[in-house]
Amino acid sequence: MRKKMLKTLVSFGLVSAMLLSACGSSTDTSADGTAPAETSQTTEEAAEASTAETAQETASETGSGEMVTLKFFNDETWWPYTVWEGRIPEKISEKTGVTFEVSTAADSTALNLMIASGDLGDLILTSDTAKIARLQTSDMCYTLDELAQMAGEESFDVHPVLRLVNTADDGNLYTIMAGYSPDYYMKEYPKAVYETTGLVVRDDIYEALGSPEINNLDDFEAVLAMVKEQYPDVVPFMYNYTHGNGIIKMLLGSDAAVGGFLDVDGHAKAFIEDPVLEDYYALMNDWYLKGYMTDENFAFTSDSDDSDYMASGRLFALAKYSDTANEMSITLSEAGCDYGLVQLVDIVKNQPGAKHLQTSAGWRGLFVPKSCSDPVAAYNFLKFMYSEEGQCLSLWGEEGVDWNWDEEHSYPILNYDWEAPNEADGMKFWGWTYHDGVRNTLPSYGEGGQTFEARAAATAISETNPVIGMLRMGADSEEQTIMNNLVELYNNMSAQIITASTPEESNALYQEMLSTAQSMGLEQLDEWADSQYVEKKAAYDEVKDIGAEY
């Protein structure tokens, strides 16, 4: 076991103040301000103590090696697996003593209804930020420290950076979000890359045009002009409904997430104030007026609408994701297309001023609700999935069977196609319940190809700032209401700005959007965000350089 230089963050003054501010004694004070005797308990405390005692008794009863079946609710409607079966889930069950009855949300309202009812089953998986905020309360879910204590441990053992970036507003730790690793860990695995948006073009048309170099936006626009002239029945450019037009914003110097924040001159600002947006809208309006974009793009309502255009031969270039060339190849093959896609990489490497903002502190979490029938069993499962062993098994499969480390132990060498794993074995996707910032992308290095090259190019121009990702608004807070209104404003106005009949009208609509944002409470939101940013950044700076030996 590693020597622990720090078991908690208590020794860090500012960090402890932030994390523990909401963790003071729950004992009521009397009228004169003194605490009553320790033997007295509130009804709430008594109930919590009873719950913990019951959980520990249940744990001791189920500690005989018998398999525990828990109810697993998956809020991700698109998830490939709907049952816990196959060689890999079975191996995970052998390791944890837990198996699952899986329920998958039919739509985005399902989990909200469960939250309202209070009956959440045994384990919840979601990436919805509003739902995460509702789950991160002590009356709704167990904290990881509570679960650890039920299992006979002093507290949940986790790296100080992970504890900090995942701490909820009430000072408690309810989950470890998927997709993030501390800086020191990313440096240990230099072959790990960030998942980002990306840009693809049809290979048949591109080759017919002479495969011209595309090293910057000017080169790309020149190719769009050629497509417009030589292929009048093909739409030159579209962007994806889910991922928006992040790759074009990245190439212009900033791809701040819609609904989030960014650092502008050392201050936290709402996404709608991103200085790059003015240039972005001007460019998109110019492309629209030149006929490179069509109105159909702004009528998209699902992630697959652009796939239909590409598979029917009506689209040349698509702004979507860094793995789109590989991912969409299956769709094109099934549609009988005789062409594939090229992931554009050189444009990311060479566009002047291009920048990827890596501000995520994680995006998907597993939660153990208070309705859980066996909290300790659920905790044992979580601990395994958080571990390196659990991540490697759930993502890559069995070592020595499905993969092996390279000689330097720096990336896995798979004996199957990472982009098309054997779903009958339950490969890969259960690993998305939790993975760090390393293991979901390392296989791309071993396989090489377009996906890895695109992600490596974006990683090379990345600016990392997880503190921005820590600016989480309460689900029903005034700040979240303002942000929701700004997102709606952005979505409604973007199409109008891009499809304006003149550049002057487009810019006037952009200025109108900013003015309307101010009337919606933008300044108030910025003040909240910046005050949080200063506090959280100071806390992060205290722990960010801590390495593996903590």
Image (cartoon, grey):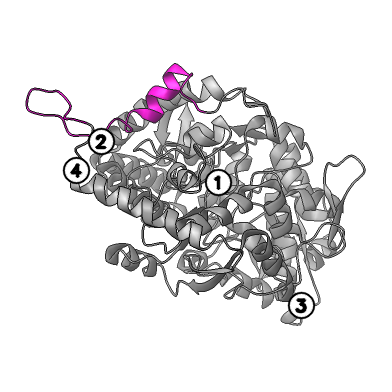
Q: Is residue 8 visible?
A: yes
Point 33% across, 33% down: residue: 23
The residues tagged by marks 2 and 3 sit, at their Cα atoms, a distance apart of 61 Å
Quadrant in which the N terminus appears: top right
Badge nearest the viewer, 4 or 1 = 4
Q: Which residues are magenta?
A: 8-37
The residues tagged by marks 4 and 1 sit, at their Cα atoms, a distance apart of 62 Å
- Picture disc at residue 283: 1
Work out whether mark 4 precedes mark 1 in sequence or the reverse, and give the earlier one.
Answer: 4
- Picture disc at residue 333: 3
Work out whether mark 2 precedes mark 4 in sequence or the reverse, and give the earlier one.
Answer: 2
Work out whether mark 1 precedes mark 2 in sequence or the reverse, and give the earlier one.
Answer: 2
Quadrant in which the C terminus appears: top right
Q: Label 2 amino acid? A: Ser
Badge nearest the viewer, 1 or 2 = 2
- Picture disc at residue 127: none
Are circles 2 and 4 on residues that touch, CB within 8 Å? yes
Badge nearest the viewer, 3 or 4 = 4
Are circles 3 and 1 on residues that touch, CB within 8 Å? no
Q: Label 4 amino acid? A: Thr
Residue 382 picture location, percent across and down: 56, 53
Q: Is residue 12 magenta?
A: yes
Badge nearest the viewer, 3 or 1 = 3
What residue would you read off at disc 4? 42
What residue would you read off at disc 2? 26
Dividing the picture into quadrants, the one containing residue 2 is top right
* Residue that extends furthest to the left in the rendered view of this protein: 31
Residue 84 picture location, percent across and down: 61, 72
Q: Residues within 10 Å of mark 4 (few under 14, many from 20)?
A: few
